[in-house]
Image: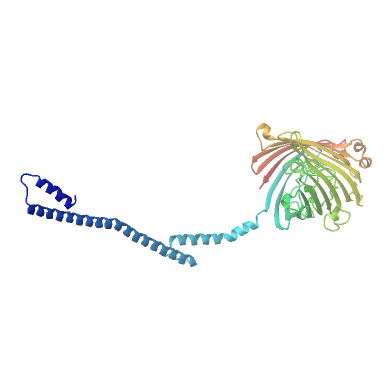
Amino acid sequence: MRPLALALALGGGLVGGADAATNAEIAALLDKLNARVERLEQDNARLQRELAASRAQPLADGSAALVQRVQALEQQQAQLNNSLEAETISENEPALSARLKAVETQTASLTAPVAKLKALDGIKGGLSLSMVAQRSLGTAQNDKQLGYRADATVGLPLAPIGDVEQSLFAQVRLGQGGALNGLSSFSNPNATAFQLGGGLRADDSVALLAQAWYQADIALPWGGFKPQSKQKLEITVGKMDPFVFFDQNTVAGDESRQFLNSAFVHNPLLDVGGDIGVDANGFTPGLRVSLLDTSDKLESWRLSLGVFGAGEKGASYQRSLGAPLVLLQAETTRRMMGGLAGNYRVYAWSNGQGAHFDPAQTAPQRHLGWGVSVDQRVGDGVTLFGRYGHQTQGSVAFDRALTLGAEANGSYWSRGGDSLGLALGWLHTSDAYRDSQSASVAHAGSERVAELYYRWRVGKQFELSPSVQWISRPGGDADARSAHVVGLRSQFTF
């Protein structure tokens, strides 16, 4: 209440009272009241100033602390920058700088090994060791033999030239132990037997550069967009095994894991019949050109032409370009029987250095022939195969050959890594050969071969394969005793 209002109120009350106060007393009272009001107003102003000061003080202190923290961070940042610019590491380094420099040092030390690993990217290699023990029963001289063969392979990719992919392949082979000596059959019961000749003793084991060839893969059409290319031209040149590229078969083409008898590994007319024309170790220089079409991803086709050195001199780099072996093959992959894959190959050959079946006839002949190789899956774990060869020109011991068989996967008896194989073969003697031999050969007609094997997968890299072979009328001789060959093969693969 303001002093004037209070005075009026008090004045009204005093005037209306019976014992009215004097004017002097009223004035004194008013002075006291005014003094008290002024003091209250002064105290209120002072309290407001103190309150404002108390509210502003924490903000000022916080601002100073924030400024100090920012300055400290800037100082640390400057120290870190100076440390990172220096190449050396000292004990006074900031922890972050020391760790960054340590990581950089380790990364730099790994640069060279990583570069080497990139250079080795795409290299493929392998090592295998096959050992075979066999014994023949029923012949006039029961024979037994133990042998081994080791192969080391490496594939090296080369830097591409435009859209042309390049690669090198090399194979080294060594081994000891020959075939069974007491058999006179056309077929060889141990196709893995490998022992270098040339005057070496039987206990000498020398490594041989078996294959060494270069291959270029050219995407077609030339100059097109490679990722969308569906055709490819392959050119291979060097020392090679022609059977790597011709007369292949999925279940009858690897003597180290499948059938051991040579009659079931390749077409007998080309292999033991001699028309493949390779050297004594099974290799020859040559050139192969192949066109592959994969427009249909499930069903492809390929056409291949091979020209190889043939005969004793042609395969040994003496007259390799004269009268070579020429092979032409057409092949396709088909999906039959509910989508199961099958491979079908038909081929023809011309060997300008063919040998006469009579060793006394040393003049080379031109041999002509054709053949078929088929393998077709008929179930989840069963694959059938068949080969047929027909000689149309040349003096050979047998001019027709038919082999049939099957391989079953062990998944049917809860052994998915195992396989069971059975094959039968007929090697029909030629008219000229029968006419030149005894009467027993003239009436024999053919050599008959059968083989049964079981491949037991002991471990991921180790397999054992016991086998039994039966050879009837060996060499086409009806009077010759049938031979039974039992064997055990071990295979190590790395």
Q: Is residue 23 visible?
A: yes
**Picture coordinates of residue 255 (x, y %)?**
75, 43
Foreground of the two, 309 or 118:
118
Foreground of the two, 8 or 371:
8
The residue under the point 73% across, 52% down is 226
Q: Residue furthest left?
A: 19
Foreground of the two, 242 or 18:
18
The relative height of residue 75 versus residue 163 in the rendered view (above or below) is below
Q: Is residue 207 visible?
A: no
**Picture coordinates of residue 315 (x, y %)?**
83, 54
**Picture coordinates of residue 128 (x, y %)?**
69, 48
The residue under the point 35% across, 59% down is 63
Which quarter of the picture shows residue 341?
Answer: top right
Which quarter of the picture shows residue 200?
Answer: bottom right
Q: Residue furthest top?
A: 413
The residue under the point 89% across, 43% down is 391
User: Taking 244 as reference, is 442 left or right?
Assistant: right
User: Taking 111 as reference, is 137 left or right?
Assistant: right
User: Taking 102 as reference, is 379 left or right?
Assistant: right
The relative height of residue 391 versus residue 280 in the rendered view (above or below) is above
**Picture coordinates of residue 222 (x, y %)?**
78, 54
